[in-house]
Image: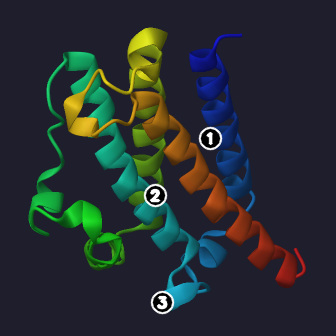
């Protein structure tokens, strides 16, 4: 298996374990505040989706051989948004906290599948080349894929820890 297929297989597995876990939880448990800053599982999924949109923009930029076109909401933060994850996270919470779980879940799910689709369309050579896209400042698109995996895994592990504490 080449590196691209290995990364995409890991991401698909990540998607599947999230879907399995989310399907096993009641909406009440998903929407109850539980985590840092009084976030719920729903808020965590909205957070993952927000950063996913940024990753999708980068992957799409790579596929189209142009600079990414980031979502409009991120531009409201200012030019230094990449240096201020706390502001991005706060805006994400403010924007999505009142949205229904079904909408948040659907957005995240569609975004994850779109992200996988884009990764699949880009050649392995272009995914791994850290010099291919100057706007990535030496990083490769494969790094974007792996970072998304790591981000989802970090939150998945926190969620599992919380569920264990709850005796589930």
**In the rendered structure, are the residues bearing label 1 and label 2 in contact, judged by CB atoms less than 8 Å apart?**
no
Q: Quadrant of the C terminus?
A: bottom right
Residue 66 versus residue 27 in the image, above or below: above
**In the rendered structure, are the residues bearing label 3 and label 1 in contact, judged by CB atoms less than 8 Å apart?**
no
The CA span between labels 3 and 2 is 16 Å
Give the camera-side residue of 25 and 53.
53
Judge from the rendering whether residue 40 lies leftward or rightward of residue 158; answer left or right. left
Residue 157 versus residue 49 in the image, above or below: below
Residue at 44%, 10% in the rendered image: 125
Residue topped by disc 3? 37
The residue lying furthest to the right in this view is: 167
Mark with earlier residue (3, 1)? 1
Circle 3 Cα neighbour tier, 10 Å, few/some/many (<14 / 14–19 / ≥20): few
The CA span between labels 1 and 2 is 12 Å
Residue 48 is tagged as 2
Mark with earlier residue (3, 2)? 3
Please provide percent x and percent y for residue 98: 34, 77
């Amino acid at each position: 298996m080449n590196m691209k297929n290995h990364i995409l297989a890991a991401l698909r597995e990540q998607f599947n374990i999230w879907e399995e876990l989310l399907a096993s939880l009641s909406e009440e448990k998903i929407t109850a505040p539980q985590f840092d800053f009084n976030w719920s599982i729903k808020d965590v999924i909205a957070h993952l989706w927000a950063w996913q949109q940024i990753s999708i923009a980068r992957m799409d930029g790579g596929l189209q051989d142009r600079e990414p076109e980031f979502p409009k909401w991120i531009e409201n933060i200012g030019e230094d948004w990449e240096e201020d994850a706390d502001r991005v996270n706060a805006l994400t919470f403010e924007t999505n906290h009142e949205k229904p779980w079904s909408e948040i879940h659907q957005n995240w799910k569609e975004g994850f599948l779109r992200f996988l689709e884009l990764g699949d369309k880009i050649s392995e050579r272009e995914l791994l080349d850290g010099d291919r896209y100057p706007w990535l400042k030496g990083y490769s698109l494969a790094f974007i894929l792996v970072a998304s995996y790591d981000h989802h895994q970090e939150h998945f592990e926190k969620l599992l820890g919380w569920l264990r504490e709850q005796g589930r």
